[in-house]
Amino acid sequence: MKVAAATVDSERRTLILTTDPHPRDAVYLLETGASKPPGERSSPGLQPTRGEMIAYDLSGVSVTLATGDVEAENAWEGWWPDFDPQTSQRMTVDSREHDRGFALLKQAGRATLESLVVLPKGRVVLRLVCNEPMEVSLNGENPSSQDKTQAEFVVESTGDPNALFMTVRPERRERPFSFQATYRTDHDKKDRALSRDRLILPWVPPTPPSQPDRTPPPFQLSGGDRARGEALFHGDRAKCSGCHRLRGKGGSVGPDLSNLNNRGLDELYRDIAEPSAAIHPDFNAYAVALKDGRVIAGIIRAEGAEKIRVSDSDAKMTEIPRSEIEELRPSGTSIMPVGLVGAIGEQATRDILAFLRAPAPLNPTPLEP
């Protein structure tokens, strides 16, 4: 994953990294460079010294805070490790930016909290309790029962993440509001705390669902012509090379297709016919909502600390200043158009498959600069 920029805050307490989007919910390892005194050089022949390894994940809660009336603009945006602000405050000691946010909770205003909650499979009762009035929804649905400070959801859980959205309107007080989330199942009647490992940040791309048994392709896939397939791949009819590179030729919006000759015809056909069934994690699409009301969808790459680049299904690239972005959301679908097989026909599909599975030539085309 590309790190486009790295800065340290003015007090040298916080490292801020600007990266390409994180492709999945996982534990990430960041290797920091080994520091040397100014002017010291490595000895000839020695391997560079490795730095420290920092592990982090994408668990937690997305938080926005506003003070004053209902229509007030956000005064703080960031991440908490837990829904409960008092727990989060204990877990972010020495973070000056978090200290600034927690100080705002002593004023009357609005706190908006959002996370993806992973519950056990089966029937689950999720119970939320807050010492301030709250409004809450799960997957866009209202609670089964609710009063001002308590809410309960009865969920038939599949084990997939559930979008929990909550707004709290705290009154002026000396300490932040408190919040507790518990769940119980038909097999375990005891209320269990909703732990950090069950909270995923809302902008994390969804995990692809397990694929059901697939029906056979509707027509014969073998018998294509490699030369015709190459012309189709790079031509205006199929337009594959606008987004995909193969053996050094083509675009970089989508995955490189240079090493597909060992994959089966059925599998390659499904990738073309159902592009959203299995998305390469490095090419998750996002919807970018801008402050002027526009929404741009595509593959995101970081362009330094101040901009991102969005590449759409037509291979058009748009640079957007980060200051103009209102929200980023994973779309869960591929930007590759659906219906290509129907548009080009059975024989053209066979030809493209033959080209994709053909071994690389002995004298490959030189790589583009």
Image: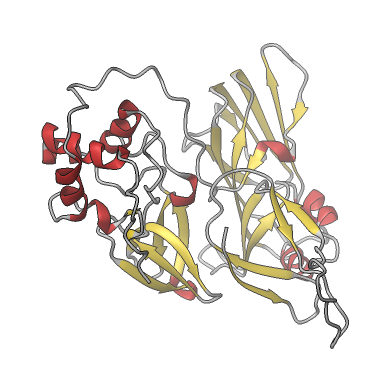
Left or right position of 191 against 138: right
User: Where does the image place residue 43, in percent across and percent down from the top left?
Assistant: 85, 76
Q: Is residue 198 visible?
A: yes
The residue shown at (16%, 38%) is 225
Q: Of all residues shown, which one is farthest toward the front?
A: 362
The residue shown at (53%, 49%) is 23
User: Where does the image place residue 157, in percent across and percent down from the top left?
Assistant: 55, 23
Q: Compared to 189, does 43 lie above or below?
A: below
Left or right position of 2 against 269: right
* Viewer-side residue, 145 vs 323: 323
Q: Of all residues shown, which one is farthest toward the top?
A: 187
Q: Compared to 124, does 195 lie above or below?
A: below
* Viewer-side residue, 206 vs 293: 206
The residue shown at (29%, 17%) is 215
* Viewer-side residue, 119 vs 132: 119
User: Where does the image place residue 230, in percent across and percent down from the top left?
Assistant: 20, 48
Q: Compared to 12, does 33 lie above or below?
A: above
Left or right position of 351 against 128: left
- Quadrant of the drawing holding the C terminus: bottom left
Q: Is residue 292 visible?
A: no
- Total numbered badges shown on the rendered structure: 0
Quarter of the view holding residue 1: bottom right
